[in-house]
Image (cartoon, rainbow, N blue to C red):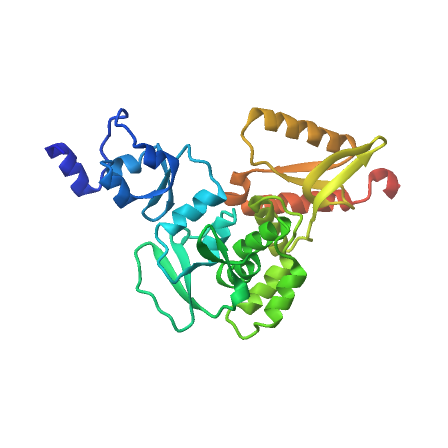
Amino acid sequence: MDGVQRDFARRGILPLVPASQPIPAELRRAPFTTSRAAQLGVSRYVVRGPEFRKLFRGVWAHVDLPDTLAHRLAAVRLVLPDGAFICGLTAAWVYGIDVQDRRADLVWMGTRTGRRLRDRAGCMSREITVAAGDLQVLDGAYITTPLRTVFDCGRWLSLVEGTVVADALSHAGLVTAEELTAYAASHRGLRGIRTLDRVIDLMEPKAESPMETRVRLLLVLSGLPRPEAQIVLEDDFGFAARGDMGYRAEKLMIEYDGSGHWGQLAADERRRSRMRDLGWEVIVVTRDDYYKWPDELVARVAAKLRERRAPSPANRA
C-alpha cells in the first residue's frame, strides 16, 4: 500500500482497486468472512467492491453465487457459535424471506434460557424458552421451526414485517393461522403476544411476495377495506387473468410491479389489458409508490373506490 492508499484508508475512503486482481475459487463457490478473504490475500476493499454482496456484518458472497437455502445456512454457520441456534429474523432469512429491519445485518442466534453465550461481533443473542419441538436441524445447524419463527418474528419485528414472515411461510404451506393461534394460546405470558395477535388477523397465505404484503397492509392500516388477494378473473372461455389484490365489488385491481425485465413487463401488460377488457380498473404500484409516496398511493386507491362505488349517470337518471 503506497502513501496515497494509506491516506485514503485513514480517512475511510475506499481507493480504486485494479479489476484484474484474481479472486480465489474458494471465495466464488461459498460464503466467506472478511478475515478469511484476508488470509487468501484479498483485501477488504476488494470484498466491498462490485464482485461481492454483503450477507451479514463481516460475511460476504460472490455476486454470482446462487442464493439458495444451503448457501444461506453456510453463511450463518460461519459465525454461529456452538450451543446456539438460528432464530428470529435470521431464521426467516434462511427460509427465504428478506425482511426489512435495521438489524438485518446481524445474525440472530438463540440460546436456551439460563445459558448465556459471550457476545460476538455481528451477532445478536437472545435467551429463549424453547421446547424440543421448536427446533429442527438443517445442514447441521439448529434453527427454529417455521411455526416458532413466525411466532417470534410476529412478536419481535414490526407489525408489517412480522406479517411479511407470516404471509411467506403460510404461502409456502409451512404454517397455518390455526396452528399459530393454537401455539400463541399456549404461550400467552411472553412479551409481544398482542402484536402477534394482530399479525394472525392480518396474515394472508395467498400473498405471493413481501411487497404484496406491504402494499396490502399499507392500505388496511390506513383505514381502507382489506383487499382480496389473488383475484381470478374469467371470461366466456374460462380463465382470463389473475391479479395481486383488489376489490371485487368495485372491480378495482391493485398490482405490484416489481419486475424490470422487458419480457415480464410485456406479459404483465397483456394480463392487465385483459382485466381492463373485463371492466376492471387497474392501479399499478411501484417500489417508489410504496416507499416515497405512500400517502398519495392510499389517496389514489381511496378515490378510485369512491368513484367506482358512485352510481353512474344513467342509474341516477
Quadrant (top left, top right, bottom left, bottom right) of the C terminus: top right
Depth check: 131 or 199 in front? 131
The percent position of residue 25, horizontal first and vertical second, equals 33, 32
Q: How many marks?
A: 0
Q: Residue at x 33, y 36 (%)?
A: 26
The percent position of residue 43, horizontal first and vertical second, equals 23, 37
The percent position of residue 125, horizontal first and vertical second, equals 38, 62
- Seen in the picture, residue 38 relative to 202 is either above or below; the reply is above
Judged left or right of residue 232, residue 184 is left
Judged left or right of residue 250, residue 157 is left
**Which residue is outermost to the left?**
3
- Seen in the picture, residue 151 relative to 269 is either above or below; the reply is below
The percent position of residue 309, horizontal first and vertical second, equals 77, 46
Quadrant (top left, top right, bottom left, bottom right) of the N terminus: top left
Q: Residue 99: tell me if it is visible.
A: no
Q: Residue 147: tell me if it is visible.
A: yes
Judged left or right of residue 57, residue 259 is right
**Which residue is outermost to the front?**
140
**Which residue is outermost to the bottom?**
189
Q: Residue at x 25, y 27 (%)?
A: 21
- Seen in the picture, residue 132 relative to 238 is either above or below; the reply is below
Depth check: 32 or 259 in front? 32
Name the image quarter holding residue 11. Answer: top left
Q: Residue at x 55, y 55 (%)?
A: 160
- Seen in the picture, residue 122 relative to 5 is either above or below; the reply is below
Judged left or right of residue 255, residue 60 is left
**Which residue is outermost to the right?**
317
Q: Residue at x 18, y 40 (%)?
A: 9
